[in-house]
Amino acid sequence: MAQIMNTTTPIRSTTVWLFALLAGWGGLAMASTPTEKVVCTQLPRSQWMSEQQARAAFDAPRYLLVRFKISRGNCHEFYAVEKDGTVVEAYRHPVTGETVRLTRVPPPTPVAPQPTGQPEASGTPPAGR
């Protein structure tokens, strides 16, 4: 198992990490309260655009990773990750293609290491000795 992990390419690792981030964030977004439920249409699905048309209207190729689904409120729902790591959740009307709701979550900012207050070991003795 360790050998498999060592042969993983950076692109594969990044894709797995982004998918995990997207899946985790998507779980939070799906746990919205009933008052936040987005309802798009009651029209029959025969009048909706296809998934390919919806992806084109969403401009899916500009994102690193895109997940498409149909929401309970009959919307085309997209979860996507931008190149900078921003996660996008978009609800689009399945007939008109208009954006009904768009949420962006910026990537987490890295935490800078805290100084310990001790001098770094540089190999040279302190001045004056």
Image (cartoon, rainbow, N blue to C red):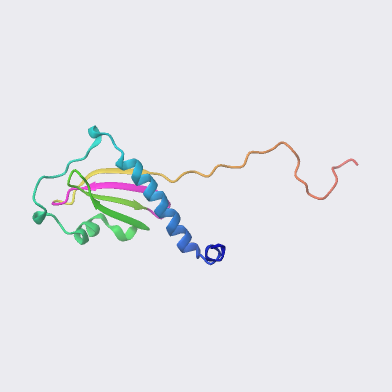
Please give the name of the residue rendered at 30% of the width and 42% of the height, measured from the top-left corner: 30
Q: Can you give x and y, in whole percent of width and height, for residue 50 in the image?
A: 17, 59
Q: Can you give x and y, in whole percent of width and height, for residue 103 in the image?
A: 31, 42
Residue farthest to the right, as pictured: 129
Number of numbered discs present? 0
The part of the chain drawn in magenta is 82-95
- Above or below residue 83? Residue 113 is above
Please give the name of the residue rendered at 41% of the width and 52% of the height, measured from the top-left corner: 20
Q: Is residue 25 left or right of residue 13?
A: left
Q: Which of 25 and 127 is in front in this view?
A: 25
Q: Is residue 30 left or right of residue 118?
A: left
Q: Can you give x and y, in whole percent of width and height, for residue 82 in the image?
A: 38, 53
Residue 20 is covered by the magenta coloring: no
Residue farthest to the top, as pictured: 35
Displayed quadrant of residue 51: bottom left
Work out which quarter of the rendered image holds the C terminus and state it: top right
Please give the name of the residue rendered at 14% of the width and 51% of the height, measured from the top-left corner: 96
Please give the name of the residue rendered at 40% of the width and 54% of the height, measured from the top-left corner: 19
Q: Nearer the viewer, residue 122 or 51?
A: 51
Residue 84 is covered by the magenta coloring: yes
